[in-house]
């Protein structure tokens, strides 16, 4: 028997309802048709990661920008004057800018130096070397200053420098006091005659057997100024020591004849080397006039750089120091399920035996659940919530208060029993 052919049936079309899974797979095959941003496995995009990095680094960038601005301001705006005592660029009462400016108007080339090696190199024959008070000179520095070929003027120098510069002919008197009133020069030096009576400390004395020493403004056996002629190479020079250096300062130069004495001492030659020793300077000169080995150990900017580095270290220490404060929420790289979080927190509580903390968390969750179920506002106190739960469940208020606000459990079994009773209370509230 020949089988009857079955006519071909028309294809059955599926409903036109869109399939989200199929559209998602189609979008994955044809990426050009997708216009949404590409995200990574942690749910972030390139823009969000960039914004997050900027939020973390913006304070660092701000601090660095402020430090750079401060450095630029300090580098561009240098102070016109200094505050160093007896410095020729110090306009304060303890400075000597007034004398330096007057000498400059009279044609004297005033060279301000702070290193002994520079002073010795610049102080040649026919010049004047002024050494302002210095108490931290090294022995080799004292020898270098005492051996210069220039006329040497010492202001308030210590005994070692005075003895070395005068070959032991003059020394300082220990415990010298300032003159109560102006004293006559009592010497035949022309500059002393022009200065007249002065009120200076008489703290210099002539050593026994010394010859050629001239003392001026003497009180008893001591004088305020001592001048000694000395040999210097092929010629002669003078060494003048003044025990009281205040006559050159801005605050005292106009008193009595201090100005005449200062201009007469410092304006004798066309070049004046004004040495204000730096406390960090260890430079001197060797026997052949070349700088000693310690001349380049500390450059002029070493002190400023050291202080700036110390400031940077302190700022970095404060910035990176651990602060005690509230916890900061941090975005997790993955999403953790609530059940895993609950179990992990429970294990932590069990490991640290924080039964009271765990019980407080269970009671707080139960109180929030039953309050929301019964319509009790969050601002209600414990008595209102306890009464509402008692009416809904038929329990006594004492029993409800003991469950929700009772003492913490003393062992794990009590904690388990509390959890079971709280669960029962929630069930009773939901059934009410």
Image (spheres, rainbow, N blue to C red):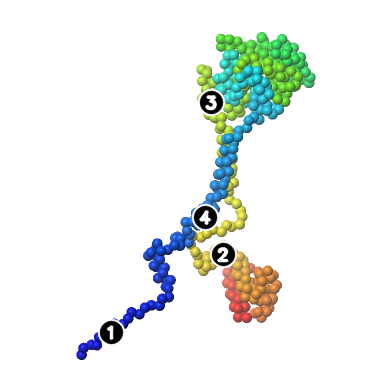
Total numbered badges shown on the rendered structure: 4
Give the structural element (helix, strand or loop) at label 2. Answer: helix
Apparent side of residue 137 relative to residue 28 in the rendered image (left or right)? right
Cβ atoms under marks 3 and 1 closer than 8 Å: no
The N terminus, quarter of image: bottom left
Mark 4 or mark 3: whose residue is earlier in sequence: 4
For marks 4 and 1, give the one nearer the viewer. Answer: 1
The residue that mark 1 highlights is: 7
**Residue 17 badge:** none
Q: Which residue is mark 3?
A: 295
What is the quadrant of residue 22 in the picture?
bottom left
- Kindly report the distance in space between the C-alpha atoms of the residues bearing marks 4 and 2: 33 Å
Q: Which residue is mark 2?
A: 349
Q: Earlier in the sequence, mark 3 or mark 1?
A: 1
State which mark lies toward you, 3 or 1.
Answer: 1
Cα–Cα span, label 3 and label 2: 68 Å
Identify the residue under disc 4.
52
């Amino acid at each position: 028997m020949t089988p009857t052919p079955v006519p071909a049936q028309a294809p059955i079309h599926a409903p036109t309802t869109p399939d989200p899974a199929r559209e998602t797979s189609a979008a994955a095959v044809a990426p050009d048709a997708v216009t949404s941003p590409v995200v990574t496995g942690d749910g972030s995009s390139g823009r969000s990661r960039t914004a997050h990095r900027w939020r973390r680094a913006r304070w660092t960038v701000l601090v660095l920008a402020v430090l750079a601005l401060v450095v630029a301001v300090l580098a561009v705006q240098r102070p016109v004057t200094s505050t160093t005592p007896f410095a020729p660029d110090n306009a304060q009462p303890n400075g000597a800018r007034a004398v330096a400016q007057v000498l400059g108007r009279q044609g004297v080339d005033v060279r301000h130096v702070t290193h002994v090696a520079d002073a010795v190199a610049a102080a040649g024959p026919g010049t004047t070397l002024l050494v302002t008070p210095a108490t931290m000179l090294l022995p080799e520095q004292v020898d270098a200053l005492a051996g210069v070929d220039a006329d040497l003027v010492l202001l308030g120098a210590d005994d070692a420098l005075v003895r070395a510069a005068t070959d032991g002919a003059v020394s300082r008197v220990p415990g010298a006091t300032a003159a109560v009133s102006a004293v006559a020069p009592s010497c035949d030096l022309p500059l002393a005659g022009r200065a007249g009576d002065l009120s200076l400390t008489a703290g210099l004395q002539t050593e026994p057997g010394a010859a050629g020493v001239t003392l001026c403004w003497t009180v008893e056996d001591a004088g305020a100024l001592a001048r000694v002629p000395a040999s210097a190479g092929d010629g002669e020079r003078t060494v003048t020591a003044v025990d009281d250096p205040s006559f050159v300062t801005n605050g005292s130069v106009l008193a009595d004849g201090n100005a005449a004495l200062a201009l007469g001492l410092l304006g004798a030659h066309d070049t004046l080397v004004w040495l204000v020793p730096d406390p960090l300077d260890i430079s001197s000169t060797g026997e052949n006039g070349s700088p000693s080995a310690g001349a380049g150990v500390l450059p002029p900017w070493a002190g400023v750089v050291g202080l700036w580095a110390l400031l940077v270290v302190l700022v970095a220490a404060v910035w990176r120091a651990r602060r005690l404060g509230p916890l900061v929420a941090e975005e997790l790289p993955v999403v953790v399920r609530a059940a895993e979080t609950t179990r992990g927190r429970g294990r932590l509580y069990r490991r640290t035996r924080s039964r009271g903390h765990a019980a407080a968390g269970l009671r707080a969750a139960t109180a929030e659940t039953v309050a929301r179920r019964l319509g009790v506002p969050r601002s209600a106190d414990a008595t209102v919530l306890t009464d509402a739960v008692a009416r809904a469940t038929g329990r006594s208020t004492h029993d409800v208060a003991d469950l929700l606000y009772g003492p913490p459990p003393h062992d794990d079994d009590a904690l388990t029993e509390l959890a079971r009773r709280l669960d029962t209370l929630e069930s009773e509230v939901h059934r009410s």
